[in-house]
Amino acid sequence: MGELDFQKHVQYIVSVEKKKDSFEALVMEHLRMNGAYWGLTTLDLLHSIDVVDKEEVISWMMSCWDADSGGFAGTVGHDPHLLYTLSAVQILALFDRLDVLDIDKLSSYVVGLQNEDGSFSGDGWGEIDTRFSYLAICCLSLLRCLDKINVVKAVEYIVSCKNLDGGFGCVPGGESHAGQIFCCVGALSITGSLHHVDRDLLGWWLCERQCRDGGLNGRPEKLADVCYSWWVLSSLIMIDRVHWIDKSKLTEFILNCQDRENGGISDRPDNAVDIFHTYFGVAGLSLMEYPGLKPIDPAYALPINVVNRIFFGKS
Ligand code: GRG
Ligand code: ZN
């Protein structure tokens, strides 16, 4: 199975950033801010964030800020959305440059997306999903502004999306899915509300996601995919049940998804690599304390030293 090829993955991430005119870059254009967050976080976990020109990234990011609404867009000239707003805050946290933000305007944008029942819309168009609850709560917490929303109602809404199997869906009654579980458990963890989770029941559902090949899937009967190394493992860590997974088999599955020639990690062995699965693979290995990687925080999806710097003022 070999080892994690630190150097090749750094080269791959830098090359994706440079290939702005490729087909892949064009179809991903609307998500550029989110892609930048995945790439930069991965570089930091690999101890290589200094290969990027931070000032250049910050000036591009600020051109994606919509001063009218207070939110960030996925790229210049597009509409703002909570997803890109959190990605922008996370990138600035990585760079230790949250000072460039207009925190009042930004937090008002997020606050304005909370609905009567405590749920959140992702943008002005109104779609509701527990993903948006996570995005809003994580973003406001990083800005030290959680007190600006109705946290009790936000938590009540998330709890109303809990299922009999212990998992969570996107809206009340929605099927449990590992991605939504990450969002709900992450938001409950950040707000100090994990007592609403049945840890044994949910831990059992999550550890059953491990397939014969060692990889994790997102729900029953589906194929294993490297991204669930993040969604499932981070949730298991937050509820203190990560020892229910076979770590060495999962490590082997992730390492087998590396492109040994050009770097990058794919969703499953022999598939094409992309920036998202490169993050999910490296972050999954970081959660399993793979030697040489920075440890990552399972709720904020940022290196632990970055989270400590925000909340305790140290690096
Ligand atoms: C900052 C870490 C971080 C996250 C931001 C947007 C978001 C918050 C979380 C998304 C959570 C989510 C719903 C992830 C699932 C993504 C995914 C792989 C969906 C695929 O679903 P299917 O049904 O695939 O196409 P399966 O694997 O079920 O066959
Ligand atoms: Zn995937």
Image: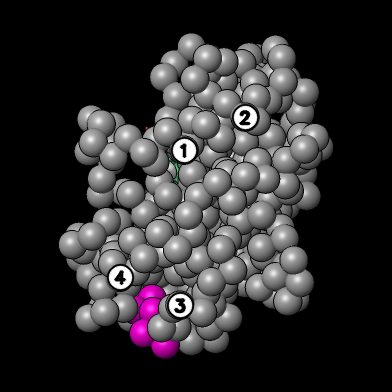
**Where 10 falls versus 29 (above or below)?**
above
The percent coordinates of residue 72 (x first, y second) are 32, 67
Q: Under tag 3, what secondary structure?
A: helix
Q: Nearer the viewer, residue 140 or 304?
A: 304
Q: Amino acid at mark 4?
A: Trp
Q: Which residue is mark 3?
A: 100
Query: Is label 4 in a helix, a strand or a loop?
Result: loop
Badge 2 amino acid: Gln
Element on which disc 2 rests: helix
Instruction: Count residues near mark 2 (Cα–Cα under 10 Å), then give few for <14, some for 14-19, many for 20+.
Output: few
**Residue 92 lies in the magenta stretch:** no
First in sequence: mark 4 vs mark 3: 4
Q: Is residue 42 left or right of residue 13?
A: right
Q: The N terminus appears in which quarter of the rendering?
A: top right
Residue 103 vs 56, above or below: the answer is below
**Does residue 51 lie above or below 74 as drawn?**
above
Tell me which segment is drawn in magenta: 104-110
The residue under the point 67% across, 45% down is 47
Indicate the position of residue 161 as horizontal and vertical percent values.
47, 57
Kindly identify which residue carries mark 2.
Answer: 7
Q: Disc 2 or 4, which lies upstream in sequence? A: 2
Q: Residue at x 50, y 66 (%)?
A: 92
Q: Disc 1 designates what residue?
A: 14
Numbered disc in front, either 4 or 1: 1
Cα distance, mark 3 to mark 1?
24 Å
Q: Mostly what secondary structure, the magenta segment?
A: helix
Q: Residues within 10 Å of mark 4 (few under 14, many from 20)?
A: many
Sequence-wise first label, 4 or 1: 1
Write down the residue under mark 4: 65
The answer to whether the residue bearing label 4 lies less than 8 angstroms from the nearest atom of ligand 1 is no
